[in-house]
Amino acid sequence: MESRITELEIKISYAEDMIDELNHTIFRQQQQIEMLISQMRTLREQMQTSQPNEALSLRDELPPHY
């Protein structure tokens, strides 16, 4: 009986360690997602301010070989 309890305690300890590691991974990923969202907003704002408001026709653009 004592060995079964010890075995369960060891398994619980490993499970707790794994849960802590997964929580840390999720936290880091959430930070990265938030950073990427912020960068996308910045890029979107830059593109909107740098492009003219009028739509360009494809005929106005030169082909790549010119």
Image: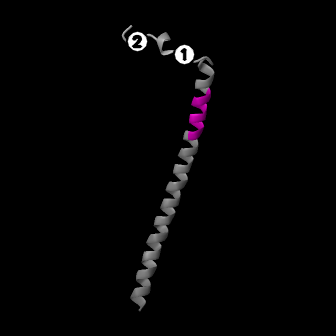
Q: Which image quarter is the C terminus in?
A: top left
Horizontally, residue 40 falls left or right of residue 9, namely: right
Residue drawn at x 58%, y 25% is: 47
Q: Main secondary structure of the magenta part?
A: helix
Q: Which residue is mark 1?
A: 56
The residue shown at (51%, 63%) is 20
* Callouts 1 and 2 close, C-beta under 8 Å: no
Badge 2 is on which residue? 63
Q: Secondary structure at mark 1?
A: loop
Q: Residue at x 61, y 17 (%)?
A: 54
Return the residue found at the far bottom: 1
Front position in the image: 32 or 37: 37
Q: Tell me if residue 36 is in the magenta stretch.
A: no
Gap in angstroms between the C-alphas marked 1 and 2: 14 Å
Q: How is the image coloured?
A: one colour
Determine the residue positioned at 54% across, 45% down: 33
Q: x and y percent of residue 15 in the render?
A: 46, 70
* Residue type highlighted by circle 2: Pro
Q: Quadrant of residue 7?
A: bottom left
Range of the magenta residues? 37-45
Say if 51 sits above or below 17 in the image.
above
Mark 1 is on which residue type?
Leu
Residue at the left extreme of this rendering = 65
Q: Position of residue 46 (x, y in %)?
A: 60, 25
Residue 39 appears at what percent x and percent y?
Answer: 57, 35
Q: Is residue 45 above or below residue 25?
A: above
